[in-house]
Amino acid sequence: MSISKKSRTKIKNTGTFLVFAGPSLFFFVMTILVPLVYGVYLTFTDWNGISREKNIVGLENYIKAFGDVKFWQSLLLTIIFTGIALLLVNYIAFHLARLVTKGVRFQNFYRASFFTPNLIGGVVLGYIWQFIFGRVLVAFGKSLDIGFLSKSWLSDTKLAMAALILVTVWQYSGYMMLIYIAGLMNVPKELLEAGKIDGCDEKACRKYIVMPMMISSFIICIFLTITRCFMTYDLNFSLTEGNPFGSTVMASMYVYRKAFSEKNYGLGQTEAILLFVVCAFVSLMQIYFTKKKEVQA
């Protein structure tokens, strides 16, 4: 039986796809889709994470999750943390990008220096800054008689969250800076020169030329910042462990404790799914509204 030319082309294209994209597709399915589907299944069970028995309980976990006040408090704290970190990270990253694209001396050195904190793992970073807040800054504050530095920020219910935000901004600003650098370098110099010829000063050029042409960079940076801050666990664990008095327990840590410390995996997985839904909704809304501005630009 002869195979038509069209069929041979389809077979060839399918084979090419499987050769190049097949391994990536396989690992994506096995590490993302399968765990996600299995995780959704576990939300309908009373599994404790250890036993072999998984009794179906229907929507009981979802009802408990919606009634879990502490979970929603941790989620609200996560939203506040994400909102503040989002503004600070992107504001600092954008201005760092402007600084190292002006042709200053040693700008490549500055780029590498600002990016370096992102290379340190969240757990290691947390322990480093725990030492800084607990020992270095305290010693510095006492020697100079500076009140707010004379005691560890990590022992204060308000300053502990400020410390967490500070370290997060320090970690992510350099990474977002690289994306903004790419955006700034893609702005055509001809447009800037034309703007200056028409009488625009540097501030006007930045507002009417540079900013609109960098919408795609803002979309990427805001999306990455939101997703990373919403799912923060390693830094939260190593820097504060949710202390003092549970004032810095964010949603990821609360879900982990619910599932593994309290051995209530079904409810913990349910709250993890709700956290994922909230994060996805916020991210999609951000992309939708910023994409509209990109089209207008």
Image (cartoon, helix red, strand yellow):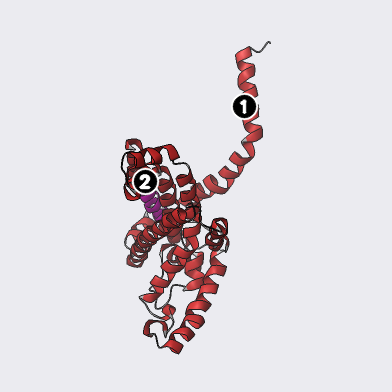
Residue 29 vs residue 269, the one in the foreground: 29
Magenta-drawn stretch contains 233? no
Check disc 1 and give the amino acid type: Thr
- In the rendered image, the quadrant that contains the N terminus is top right
| The image quarter in which residue 128 lies | bottom right
Element type where label 1 sits in the image:
helix
Residue drawn at x 45%, y 57% as measured from the top left = 96
- Disc 1 to disc 2, how far (Cα)? 42 Å
Magenta-drawn stretch contains 283? yes
Check disc 2 and give the amino acid type: Met
| The image quarter in which residue 266 lies | bottom left
Residue 223 vs residue 296, the one in the foreground: 296
Marked residue nearer the N-terminal end (1 or 2):
1
Which residue is identified by label 1?
Answer: 14
Q: Main secondary structure of the magenta part?
A: helix
Q: Is residue 27 left or right of residue 89?
A: right
Residue drawn at x 42%, y 72% as measured from the top left = 163
The dot on residue 211 is 2
Residue 160 seen from this side: yes
Percent across and percent down for residue 297 are 34, 38
Q: How many marks?
A: 2
The span shown in magenta is 273-285
Would you call the spot at circle 1 few (<14 residues within 10 Å), some (14-19), or many (20 or more)? Answer: few
Percent across and percent down for residue 232 are 46, 62
Closer to the eye: label 1 or 2? 2
Residue 44 seen from this side: no
